[in-house]
Image (cartoon, rainbow, N blue to C red):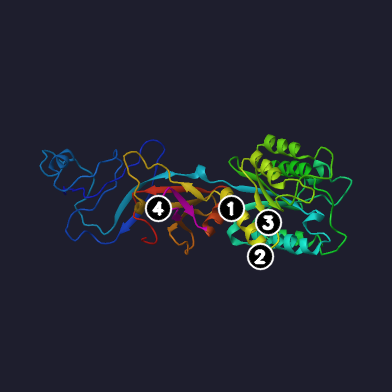
Amino acid sequence: MAHVKLSAVVWAASAAGVALGCSSKVDEPDPSGSPPPFRTELPALMPMAEDDAPAAAMLGGEGSATQPDFGVSDEPTSEIEVVCAARNAASELRRVYLGFAFDVSASMGGNNELRYNTKWGPVVAATKAFFAEHESAGISAAMTFFPDADEATRCTDAAYLVPDVPQRLLPSPAFAAAIDGLNYTLGSDTWRGSTPSLFAFNGTVASLQSISDAPSNAVSAVVFVTDGVPAGCDNNEIQPVVDAVRNSGVMTFVVGVTDPVDADGNNNLDNLNLIAAAGGTDQAFIIATGDPAQTEADFKAAIDEIRGVAVSCNIEIPLPPTGTDFIPEQVNVTYGSGSAGDVPLTYDPNCNRDNAWRYDDAQAPASIVLCTNTCGQVQQDVSARLVVEFGCERRGAPQ
């Protein structure tokens, strides 16, 4: 029977639901003639130095009276399987559903050339970009315009139950087409009056809550894009809106495309912040108008921040199995798909490769970040799961 000397840590899966996974193959035998490492399902072992005679004796090594049979053959082999422990992180993956309530009232542009060029134009450009960008992949979104085109119903929740653009995965050209379909040009008579914020919010929330195929751990959020305080309908003051947002329990972002104080002296900043706070997002994103390029850039930055908060492609690194340590260079990630099987992901700190992941901070990692194309693929797969493997030779770039 060959003598076996442990020169590295051998990880064993704990009994608490930890699955074994991740194997790496070595094609050549050790030139020293020593037998290969072995696959074990023993309890986790502590690392042993080569000169640790007492520990060697405990394992039946040199200096021990008896040598247990580990099943290692005396025959030479050219293939070694190294097994590392894995922990499932599937519970961290969530589908994201956004409901955009988009203010298309005349005060967004209307018949005022300055307002049209400094507010409507740049906001529309940034909004279209968000829905078309590859970075939005994996998010599901819908858009509801308010006020409704029908003056008889625009002050009712029912007018906003069916989005102008139904829920769909991004990127999608449907949103740009819907905005263009408003036929809003400077001086046209198609602009709508009033700002029925309360009813638009209620309808948008009801629409989000009616999604029948949403997973139980899905994230839903309203993105409220408006240039002013509620106006034009009964019971449409700021306090009823704040109460409705708070009572809904739905995360609500507010993007205010407006000056801090409107022409009537209303403090838009305070009012919109109240809505955001009630929706659990602290304060509104206030986008100043006047410089079209800056308005577009600021609006895009606000939407990008919302995207970053909503999308859960940052997965907190799970605790390694009992008796193991987290070593950043010895972690692998595998994406499990219900349709395609297991897909090994590649570590790439620059996210230049397909099916890649990186750490949030390479020097002091706290979470695993799925790169853009990987995130989109995983978010679209309702059966997706991730397995984080510890103690493995890492796939991908060495950084």
Q: Which residue is mark 3?
A: 288
The extreme front residue here reads 265
Q: Which residue is mark 1?
A: 305
CA separation in Å, label 2 and label 3: 11 Å
Residue 368 part of the magenta segment: yes
Say whether residue 185 is left or right of residue 379: right
Contact, CB < 8 Å: mark 1 with mark 2? no
CA separation in Å, label 4 and label 3: 45 Å
Q: Nearer the viewer, mark 3 or mark 1?
A: 3
Residue type (three-letter) at the residue carrying disc 1? Glu
Q: Nearer the viewer, mark 2 or mark 3?
A: 3
Report the number of discs: 4
Residue type (three-letter) at the residue carrying disc 4? Asn
Q: Nearer the viewer, mark 1 or mark 2?
A: 2
Residue 79 part of the magenta segment: no
10 Å neighbourhood of mark 1: few (<14), some, or many (≥20)? few
Q: Which residue is mark 4?
A: 332
In primary-sequence order, the first of circles 2 and 4 is 2
Segment tinted magenta in the rendering: 358-371
